[in-house]
Amino acid sequence: MRQFMNNFRKYTYLLGELVKKNIKLRYRRSYLGMLWTLIEPLLTMIVLTIVFGNLLGRNRSDAAFIGVPFPVYVLTGRLLYSFFSSSTNAAMRSIRANGAMIKKVYVPKYIYPFSGVLANFLIFLISLIVLLGVMVFFLLTGGYKAPMNGYMLLSLIPLLNLFVLSLGVGLILSTLCVFFRDVEYLWSVMLMLIMYCSAIFYFVDSMGSGTQKLIKMNPLFGVIHNFRRTFFGQPFDVPLLAYTTVFAGVSLVVGLVIFYRKQDTFILNI
């Protein structure tokens, strides 16, 4: 473990440069640049609110989110899902995208998927400004009536789970994608399924018990649900928190094991 930490500190500068590179490439040739980090979730929130507001939102309620405006409810789910989607995609492509560097210079290969996840996490943290701004807007207009208390500070725990989950899944995908290029296309389909099972624009308690159990098996739903609960002043759903924490931890361990066992053969397949 000490050797791993020393090696990690040795390449901290390179990690920072890779993170900067990933962020720059994401907004390359864009006139608005980083402003899209704030504009995109806001526009998505407006579209989802218009489309699903009356169908699955305002006419139904979830006891845990009484007093929360539907646009704020949608925005919280969309922001967390967008980070999971973009970070796992970035990690999945990281080894192949940096193939030329891997062939020329020795660098711990885990740095590449890690830098992809970290770059997207920084972008995600910036996008939270939009969430705070929308909340302030509804507070000033009287549309936000959910409690605001110390539970809001605990929302950092689901975010940590989300980061660990994204890194673990990203390591697994980055390894598989080196040997099986079809993984990239299969993952795009899986992300669509994960999105619809994450309760981004609907309330779970309006569904049958069987459907609720199925949706709660999705670890991303558990992360989003507990982030919403704490961010809106409610206590954790403890069983769901335990499940998502264990799932995220296991995914990271599995990702590291698979990655380290296969990393020496990457150079033969990129």
Image (spheres, rainbow, N blue to C red):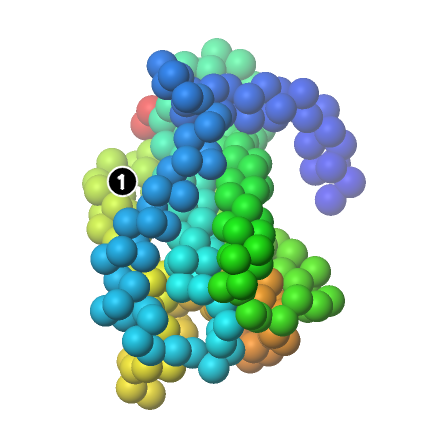
What's under tag 1, amino acid-wise? Glu
Lateral position of residue 6 relative to residue 19, left or right:
right
Query: Nearest the camera: 239 or 258?
Result: 239
Identify the image quadrant of residue 221.
Answer: bottom left
- How many numbered badges does the structure rendering display? 1
Residue 264, x across and y down, in percent: 47, 31
Q: Residues within 10 Å of mark 1 (few under 14, many from 20)?
A: some
Identify the image quadrant of residue 153.
Answer: bottom right
Lateral position of residue 205 relative to residue 20, left or right:
left
Lateral position of residue 128 relative to residue 93, left or right:
right
**Measuring 37% from the left and 32% from the top, which residue is drawn there?**
93
Q: Residue furthest top?
A: 104
Query: Looking at the rendering, in which quadrant would you find the C terminus?
Result: top left
Lateral position of residue 21 relative to residue 7, left or right:
left
| Residue 110 makes an appearance in the image | no
Query: Nearest the camera: 242 or 75?
Result: 75
Residue 64, x across and y down, in percent: 51, 78
Q: Residue furthest bottom?
A: 209
Query: Looking at the rendering, in which quadrant would you find the N terminus?
Result: top right
User: Looking at the picture, does residue 219 appear above or below residue 104?
Assistant: below
User: Looking at the picture, does residue 249 appear above or below residue 91?
Assistant: below
| Residue 203 makes an appearance in the image | yes
On the image, numbered disc 1 is attached to which residue?
184
Residue 92, x across and y down, in percent: 38, 38
